[in-house]
Amino acid sequence: MIPTIPQPRRFRVIYGLYIALFFIYLALPLGVVAIFAFNDSQFPSLPWEGFTWNWFFGDSRPQIGVFHERGILRAIGTSGFVALCVAVLSVTVGTTNAFLFNRYDFRGKGFLYVMMLLPLVVPGIVLGISILVFSSNMANRIWDVAQIDLQMLRPGLLLVILGQFSFITTIATLVISARLQKFDRTLEEAALNLGATRLVAVRTVTLPYLAPALIGAIVVAFLMSFENFNTTLMLVGSDAPLTIAMFDRLKEGSTPLLNAVSLLLMLASSLLAMSLVLFQRRS
């Protein structure tokens, strides 16, 4: 719908209803999850048994809250650690990738760029299985040859970090490249003419210009890592991130505890996204 072109009233009403229904369709499941986080019942379903904070702050069974459930808190800490590692690695490598593809021409550049994009079109579970099979074969071969058991090649946090890093780096690269393409390189040349080295010019001129994109890439990478399930499921060991821990709890039976965790994640993600938007508007 183009605002500058007059539209019949009936069309505008139908279009408005479509937009409203679309957002209701998106928000309704989240709203239901949030509401039943406060239901004083063992099951997140009707009938409504009354309002309670126990699924957040309860300290006795059967209503142990999120902040007293050690398994959930440990899983949140694990997810935070993995997400932080993935975000730092992805943005670091993504920045170098952005400079590589935007500043240099070399043979095979197009092929290398397509290979970088490939993890985005490969299903996460296939990517996880591929990494697991490859690392397991490597570990078995090293054991057969040298009798050394490399646990780092077995399912665990390291493989989870590497598995998520393999496709989140591509997204970080695209975010940073979009900003770098708009950079006026004459600013770097001016710094070089004033006596700065190439590294100093990049550090003092280019990177500050890229700051909004770098922070945005860090936030996106952190959130994508924190909520990742498909790839993580194939590579996880004994230390389960939050998505896997919630999946295991769900197999045992859903309780409003999971609704409470989901509500906290929605609030945290929304606050982080809003902070990023405000920062980028001010930059």
Image: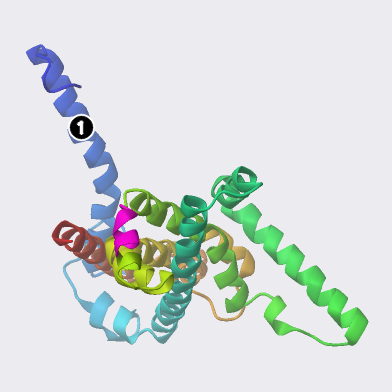
The answer to whether residue 258 of the structure is visible from this angle is no
- Residue at point 12%, 20% (across, down): 12
Place residue 60 in its image quadrant. Answer: bottom left
Crowdedness near tag 1: few (<14), some (14–19) or many (≥20) residues, C-alpha within 10 Å: few
Q: Which residue is mark 1?
A: 19
Place residue 275 in its image quadrant. Answer: bottom left
Relative to 6, say whether 65 is above or below: below
Looking at the picture, tell me which residue is in the foreground, 106 or 235. 106
Relative to 216, say whether 67 is above or below: below
Q: What span is in magenta?
A: 184-190
Q: Position of residue 11 (x, y in %)?
A: 15, 15
Place residue 267 in its image quadrant. Answer: bottom left
Q: Position of residue 122 (x, y in %)?
A: 60, 48
Q: Amino acid at mark 1?
A: Ile
The reply to whether the magenta stretch includes residue 213 is no
- Residue at point 42%, 67% (across, down): 226
The answer to whether residue 217 of the structure is visible from this angle is yes
